[in-house]
Image (tube, coloured by chain):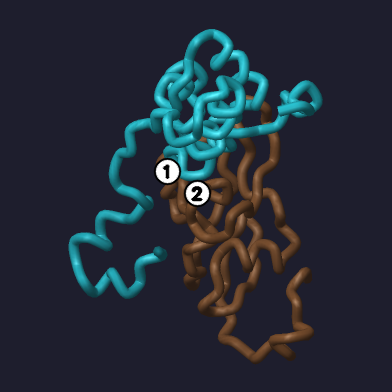
Chain colours: A brown, B cyan
């Protein structure tokens, strides 16, 4: 787990409801109310998509929903900005290649 | 731009994976507005529609051509300014859940 549980300024992390998500077929847990990107990074996943031209890994970049670098396929919908989309129970999240495909 | 030779591989448009080198080559080929560079290289045509790179490209053009920054013509901005689900516009309820 890469989650910061004792932040130097914010203090210890409060308990939160657990949300179950499926990422590339693997069942993971997240904290209710957090963004998909935060849950993935907490679970050690930093590659959210791969690029078409250079086949390079991409993850979080701006973190505020502007740059679209963190987009993934969520519940079959491609190009969902994971840094500004909250996790939900049973959410199916998949690594995306390029612009992705509707599923 | 003195160190441009070392940085030609630097990504300027992250969505379309356009490098500084490609943009400099386009400018040297006579594409000297942001719109021209976009048409020549696809920089700013990706998912984020130039939200990250338009200003950078304007500055690169300004530095390369010596034109003042405010005289470099911008590209056309197309709405929406920020990607949003249609459901956010259709009902007020979903606005609360919207991800902006």
SS label for mark 2: strand
Q: Residue at x 72, y 66 (%)?
A: A43
Q: Position of residue B38 (x, y in %)?
A: 45, 24
Q: Residue at x 77, y 69 (%)?
A: A2
Residue A101 visible within the image:
no
* Gap in angstroms between the C-alphas marked 2 and 1: 9 Å
Kindly report which numbered mark, 2 or 1, lies closer to the viewer in this rendering: 2
Residue B41 visible within the image:
yes
Relative to B73, say whether A76 is above or below.
Answer: below
Q: Residue furthest top?
A: B29
> Subunit of mark 2?
A
Q: Residue at x 56, y 20 (%)?
A: B65
Q: Residue furthest left?
A: B90
Q: Position of residue A94 (x, y in %)?
A: 56, 50
Q: Residue at x 25, y 60 (%)?
A: B87
In front of the other: A63 or B53: B53
Q: Position of residue B59 (x, y in %)?
A: 55, 34
> Subunit of mark 1?
A
Q: Is residue B33 left or right of residue A93?
A: left
Relative to A10, say whether B11 is above or below.
Answer: above
Could you tell me which quadrant the N terminus of chain B lies in? top right
SS label for mark 1: loop
Q: Position of residue B30 (x, y in %)?
A: 50, 10
The residue to which callout 2 is attached is A73
Give whichever of discs 2 and 1 has the lower sequence position. 2
In front of the other: B74 or B46: B74
The residue to which callout 1 is attached is A103
In front of the other: B23 or A97: B23
Relative to B89, say whether B46 is above or below.
Answer: above
Q: Are marks 2 and 1 on the same chain?
A: yes
- Image quadrant in which you'd find residue B63: top right
């Amino acid at each position: 787990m890469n989650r910061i549980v004792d932040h130097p300024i914010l203090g210890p992390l409060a308990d939160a409801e657990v949300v179950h998500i499926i990422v590339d077929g693997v069942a993971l847990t997240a904290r209710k109310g957090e963004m998909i990107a935060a849950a993935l990074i907490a679970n050690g996943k930093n590659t959210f998509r791969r690029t078409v031209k250079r086949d390079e890994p991409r993850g979080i970049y701006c973190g505020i929903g502007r740059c679209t670098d963190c987009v993934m396929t969520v519940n079959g919908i491609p190009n969902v900005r994971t840094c500004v989309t909250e996790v939900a129970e049973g959410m199916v999240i998949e690594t995306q290649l390029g612009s992705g495909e509707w599923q | 731009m003195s160190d441009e030779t070392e940085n030609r591989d630097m990504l300027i448009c992250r969505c379309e994976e356009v490098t500084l080198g490609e943009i400099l080559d386009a400018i040297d080929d006579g594409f000297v507005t942001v719109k021209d560079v976009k048409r020549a290289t696809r920089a700013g045509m990706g998912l984020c529609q130039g939200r990250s790179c338009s200003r950078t490209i304007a500055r690169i053009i300004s530095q390369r051509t010596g034109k003042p920054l405010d005289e470099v013509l911008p590209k056309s901005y197309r709405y929406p300014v920020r990607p949003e689900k249609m459901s956010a516009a259709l009902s007020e309820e979903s606005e609360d859940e919207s991800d902006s």
